[in-house]
Image (cartoon, rainbow, N blue to C red):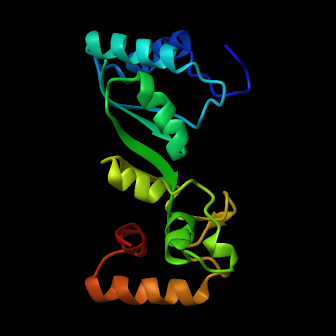
Amino acid sequence: IRKGMFDFSKEHILNSVDGILQRLKTEYLDVLLLHRPDTLVEPEEVAEAFDQLEREGKVRHFGVSNQNPNQIELLKKYVKQPLVANQLQLSITNTTMIDSGINVNMENDAAVNRDGGILDYCRLHDITIQPWSPFQYGFFEGVFLGSDKFPELNAKIDEIAAKYEVSNTTMAIAW
């Protein structure tokens, strides 16, 4: 096991799933996500692990997190199971995957395609985007709800939440 790194080795995946099943006191997982890219992945090992987990009934669906289109394509070359989800940072204050699509052919920072077009890729390949940290701004800089850094945004969220008689967290998720 490569300590301090993300480990997609067959042994690590199988041991991790067994540990998760024991801790959750369940016989199977609905979805297993490979968390963050292992840039030195041996995709054949991932395929072997997924095949074994599926055959043993331990995992029903598989996905990834924070992977770009080429990383997913590398896995898909070997893995026969569909990758059903990609967990990506997305919130009303973290919209880079949307911004780059809106700003195509513009000379501004929002036009920079930092993720290889992951939004379009996931849509084209029926991969659900599962947002992580939907209340965070920046990269773990804090929560935007109620923050003094976002007075206009919070006023608008609170206004809409009051109109529909829901919480501000409900509105931020609904966004």
The answer to whether residue 136 is above or below residue 62 is below
Residue 58 placement, left or right of 39: left
Residue 90 drawn at (x, y percent): 50, 61
Residue 9 placement, left or right of 75: right
> Measuring 61% from the left and 22% from the top, which residue is drawn there?
7
Image quarter for residue 100? Answer: bottom right
Residue 174 drawn at (x, y percent): 34, 70
Residue 118 placement, left or right of 171: right
Quarter occupied by the N terminus: top right
The answer to whether residue 138 is above or below residue 69 is below
Image quarter for residue 93? Answer: bottom right
Residue 167 placement, left or right of 66: left
> Measuring 62% from the left and 77% from the top, which residue is drawn there?
147
> Measuring 62% from the left and 73% from the top, which residue is drawn there?
111
Residue 133 drawn at (x, y percent): 53, 56
Quarter occupied by the C terminus: bottom left
The answer to whether residue 59 is above or below residue 70 is above
